[in-house]
Each structure stands twice: as C-alpha cells, then as structure tokens.
Image (spheres, rainbow, N blue to C red):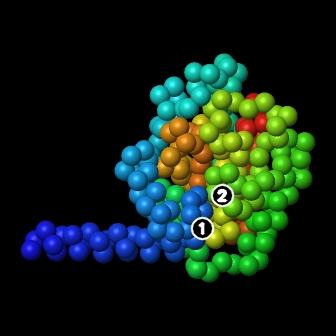
C-alpha cells in the first residue's frame, strides 16, 4: 500500500513538473513529453545543480572545466581570461532574479507572462542593431542551441577558439517567449555578469555540450537595463571574434 501511494505521488510530481516545464514555451528541445524527459535525463547525468549557477569562483580553474582548453593557444586562453566589457557593470537593483529549475530550455519567466510591448521593441531593436554594427564579423542564423529563433554567429572567416567549439559559432540570442537571453562570454565577463546580478550560468556550461562562458541574461525591467544588457552582448561578440 505504501509503495503504491509513493508511486502515485511520484507520477503526480512528474506530471506537475512537465506542466511547469511546458509553460516556459519552446526552446532547446522538442516541446513535448520526449523533450521534457530528455532534460530530466540531462539533469541526472550531466547538468550542474541549479544552485551552482550563481556561485562565485567557477572560472578560477578553467583547465578542469573548459572544453578545448588543452587545444587552445596561449593567446586564446588569455582572451578567455580577460574582460571585453568597456566598463564594470553596476550592481543590478532589486531582488535577484533566477532561472526556473530546468536544464533546458533555461528561462526566467513563462511564455504567458505579460511583457511590456514598448520595452520589448526597444530591446529587440537594440539587439538587432548589433548585427549591423558587427556585420564584418557576424551573421544571423537560426539558433543552433535553441533550435529556433534568430541568433548571432561569427562568420566562417573568423578564427574560432577551441573553447567555443561546442556552441557552433553561436554568440548570442534573445528568447521571444520571455525576453531572457544567452551569450557566450569570456570567463571574467561571465563572472562579472553573475556577481552583479545580471544573469547566471547555464547548467550545462562547463560540460562537453556548451562553452563554459555561456551565460543566461535575465529579463530587462527598464529601458536602462536593456542598454546595459546590450553592452554585455557586445562584450560576447568581441570575445568570440577575438579567435
């Protein structure tokens, strides 16, 4: 009798988890039961714990976690350790945001949560403008990591660091479902973003699947925050085009 009740409780927990996962919208895998179970499997076998994504010091020993570190040149290793931000980030005001407790897709809010149309438009316009500013080095393609939606990639003519191999040249994207985003950053800039409250690591960052500097950026709450986040995206572009 006890085992039957436990089994029913476990089944109900899985179903509720699936509903919560599906409410985030598409991204990273098929928006189906199979997609949900694939991220459950990833959580059990390869993902870092959800609480680890905001812990400091993760980038202190890249030789242990950074895929491609042994193949990288000294210059590429040095670039990964330096900042490409033009200035230090301010500490983000208010309570710290957090990603929902799933491996992928990684989102802060549900797809049905309200969005400010003017804020969304301003953010997307500024983000899209990055493609024009950096057109000599970048191009738009469907996100290799999200499986849909536009993302900015380095062009084939740009040398690629072995550290960025798992991300297929993808630099950054914004999720249309909630306006959170992802960007591949140098270790120092990833640490800056996380320590100042603007984002957190992906739970697969530091595995063979994703660059260790692959970082989630939280949903902007004001126009001023979009301007700061666009500077972070630009830092990611500058890092990725450094080769």
The circle on residue 147 is 2
The circle on residue 39 is none
Q: Is residue 70 visible?
A: yes
- Decide: few, some or many residues near mark 1? Use Cα within 10 Å; few <14, some 14-19, many ≥20: many
x and y percentages locating residue 181 in the rendered image:
65, 58
Q: CA distance from mark 2 to mark 1?
A: 9 Å
Nearest the eye: 131 or 191: 131
Answer with the quarter of the image where residue 230 lies. bottom right
Q: Is residue 215 above or below residue 219?
A: above
x and y percentages locating residue 153 in the rendered image:
77, 46
Question: Which quadrant, please, contains the C terminus?
Answer: top right
x and y percentages locating residue 31 in the rendered image:
55, 68
For label 1, the residue is 26
Residue found farthest to the front: 34
x and y percentages locating residue 102 in the rendered image:
46, 60
- Which element type, helix, strand or loop, lies under badge 1? loop
Label count reads 2
Nearest the eye: 221 or 102: 102
Residue found farthest to the top: 74
Q: Is residue 60 visible?
A: no
Residue drawn at the location 71% of the way across and 46% of the way down:
170
Looking at the image, residue 20 sits to the left or right of residue 1; the answer is right
Residue drawn at the location 73% of the way across and 73% of the way down:
119
């Amino acid at each position: 009798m006890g085992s039957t009740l436990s089994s029913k409780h476990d089944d109900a927990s899985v179903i509720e988890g699936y509903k919560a996962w599906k409410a985030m919208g598409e991204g990273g895998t098929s928006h189906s039961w199979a997609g949900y179970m694939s991220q459950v499997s990833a959580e059990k076998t390869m993902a870092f714990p959800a609480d680890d994504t905001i812990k400091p010091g993760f980038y202190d020993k890249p030789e242990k976690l950074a895929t491609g570190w042994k193949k990288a040149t000294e210059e590429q290793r040095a670039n990964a350790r330096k900042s490409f931000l033009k200035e230090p980030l301010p500490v983000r005001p208010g309570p710290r945001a957090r990603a929902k407790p799933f491996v992928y897709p990684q989102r802060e809010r549900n797809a049905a949560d309200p969005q400010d149309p003017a804020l969304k438009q301003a953010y997307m316009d500024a983000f899209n403008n990055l493609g024009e500013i950096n057109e000599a080095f970048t191009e738009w393609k469907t996100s290799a990591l999200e499986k849909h939606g536009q993302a900015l990639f380095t062009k084939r003519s740009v040398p690629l660091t072995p550290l960025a191999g798992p991300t297929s040249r993808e630099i950054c994207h914004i999720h249309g479902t909630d306006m959170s985003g992802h960007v591949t950053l140098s270790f120092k800039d990833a640490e800056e973003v996380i320590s100042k409250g603007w984002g957190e690591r992906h739970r697969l960052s530091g595995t063979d699947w994703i660059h260790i500097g692959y970082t989630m950026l939280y949903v902007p709450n004001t126009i001023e925050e979009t301007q700061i986040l666009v500077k972070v995206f630009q830092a990611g572009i500058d890092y990725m085009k450094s080769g």
